Image (cartoon, rainbow, N blue to C red):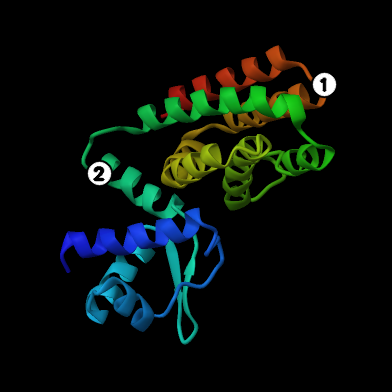
Amino acid sequence: MENKEYFKVIEYIKEQMKNGTIQIGGKLETERKLSEKLGISRPSIREALRSMENIGLIESKQGSGNYLLGNFSKNLTESFSLMLLMKQVDYVDITEVRRAIELEAYKIAMRSISDQQLKDIKSCLVNPLNERFENEILFDKNFHFSIVKATGNGFMMNIVEPLASVCEELIEETLKKATIDEREQLAQYHMQIYLGLEEKNLEKGLSAINAHYDLINQLQ
């Protein structure tokens, strides 16, 4: 398939999105209709759709058709993972980006966080002495993502989710190396971050976020 054919399909779908013909979750036209409208062979249409599925733009359902998805986190996760493998970045770089985003997200969340969002964040607080190690890792990821989610900023969420996925192995290794006292300290920082939101104490929360990531960097 020539690149110009792929971009022709992409531009057609973008135009449909602009004029409201199709929205997230909507079903694309059949391969036959796309082929007829765009003057592109069906094998080329099929290959273009497969490429779009790989980047998270559409989802192909067996026997049903292709649907507009708009999930780009998967593609970003793979890109970030490759950057790590190729040593273009390291975990310290990624951790610092996560810190910067979370600090800004915290300020935004502070202004409009709902009671339910506070409950969601609180539900991720754990005591390492009382929780299975696997659950501790999951709760850590959910805790940090819940703060970003509370901003309502879809772009932030789409950046942070793949960053967190790439860091899962790092988080696991870090917690394995950490002493129980260090793990309890991380949990205490989580508590202070949560309390900052609950009490509307921005300085308290931001200080805890910085202390949390400082300790993570020390443990790496």
Q: Are marks 1 and 2 in contact (CB under 8 Å)?
A: no
Which disc number belongs to residue 41? none
Give the CA distance from mark 1 to mark 2: 42 Å
Q: Secondary structure at mark 1?
A: loop
Task: Name the residue carrying label 2.
Answer: 85
| Residue drawn at 48 percent across, 30 percent down | 98
Is residue 70 at least partly visible in the picture? no
x, y percentage for residue 69? 50, 62
In the picture as drawn, the residue positioned furthest to the top comes out as 203
Up/down of 28 relative to 88, above or below: below
Which corner quadrant holds the C terminus? Answer: top left
Q: Is residue 156 left or right of residue 55?
A: right
Q: Report the amino acid beneath label 1.
A: Glu
Instruction: Tell which of 153 and 31 is nearer to you.
Output: 31
Q: Report the amino acid beneath label 2.
A: Leu
Q: Secondary structure at mark 2?
A: helix
Which quadrant would residue 91 be assigned to in this image?
top left
In the picture as drawn, the residue positioned furthest to the bottom comes out as 63
Task: Name the residue carrying label 1.
Answer: 199
In the picture as drawn, the residue positioned furthest to the left comes out as 2
Instruction: Tell which of 27 and 82 is nearer to you.
Output: 27
Between disc 1 and disc 2, whose residue precedes? 2
Q: Is residue 39 left or right of residue 188?
A: left
Task: Report crowding for label 2: few under 14, some 14 to 19, many 20 or more residues within 10 A (C-alpha).
Answer: few
Up/down of 16 relative to 219, above or below: below
x, y percentage for residue 65? 46, 79
x, y percentage for residue 212? 57, 24
Which corner quadrant holds the N terminus? Answer: bottom left
Which quadrant would residue 54 be assigned to in this image?
bottom left
x, y percentage for residue 39? 25, 74
Is residue 197 at least partly visible in the picture? yes
Task: Report crowding for label 1: few under 14, some 14 to 19, many 20 or more residues within 10 A (C-alpha).
Answer: few
